Amino acid sequence: PYTVQVKSGETVAATSECIGHGLYEGTAGVTSKFILLPRDVNGNRREYEGMAPTVADTFVGEAILDVNHGNGNGPTTVVASITYDAEEGWWEGTFTPVISGIYKLHVTLDAAGAPEHVYGSPFSVRISTAPIHAPTTSFDTAELDNGATAGVAEVFTITARDRFSNNLPAGGDTIDVM
């Protein structure tokens, strides 16, 4: 009898995959995370025996705002940090968008200078607003410019926003007007 050791081949973008909630949803200002599992052409998990993973493979992640839901302030392109976890044998990706909306998260393997998308990329990531933030919430008093009369109901507008100036899409927060 012979013992044969089978090792993985070179990493292939089309068979490498990403998993995790950060590929599909997140909250403005909160770090979104995902795991990247490098695989060879046959779908075997990539092994990095005797070489540095960061030399063997270069993964790049970039989240680009596709639909702005909240009119927030901040960058419309966010670079994802993708680092190797030697203990787990996978790569962890993190990114922190601050504008609420839909992002396209591109995760690529730099194959000889030509980026190739990993399986499923680009991912559509819905980023929700952060909690209401008083300093960025606005109070429109245009209707009251001529003054108010005691005992008469008056109209004004409050636009609730999070700390990144994203407009909150729904009510539910309590706002005291004094």
Image: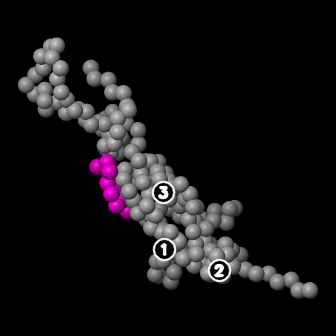
Residue 138: give x, y in percent of width and height: 25, 35
Q: Is residue 17 left or right of residue 126?
A: right
**Residue lying farthest top?**
151
- Nearer the viewer's eye, disc 1 or disc 3? 3
Give the quadrant of the C terminus: top left
Q: Which residue is mark 2?
A: 42
The mark found on residue 24 in the picture is 3
95 up-or-down from 135: above or below: below
N-terminal-most mark, 2 or 3? 3
Task: Tell me which residue sits at (48%, 77%) in the image.
Answer: 116
Q: Is residue 119 magenta?
A: no
Q: Is residue 82 left or right of residue 76?
A: right
Q: Residues within 10 Å of mark 3 (few under 14, many from 20)?
A: some
Give the residue type that dot 3 points to: Tyr
Q: Which residues are magenta?
A: 64-75
Q: Which residue is mark 1?
A: 117
Task: Tell me which residue sits at (56%, 57%) in the image.
Answer: 20
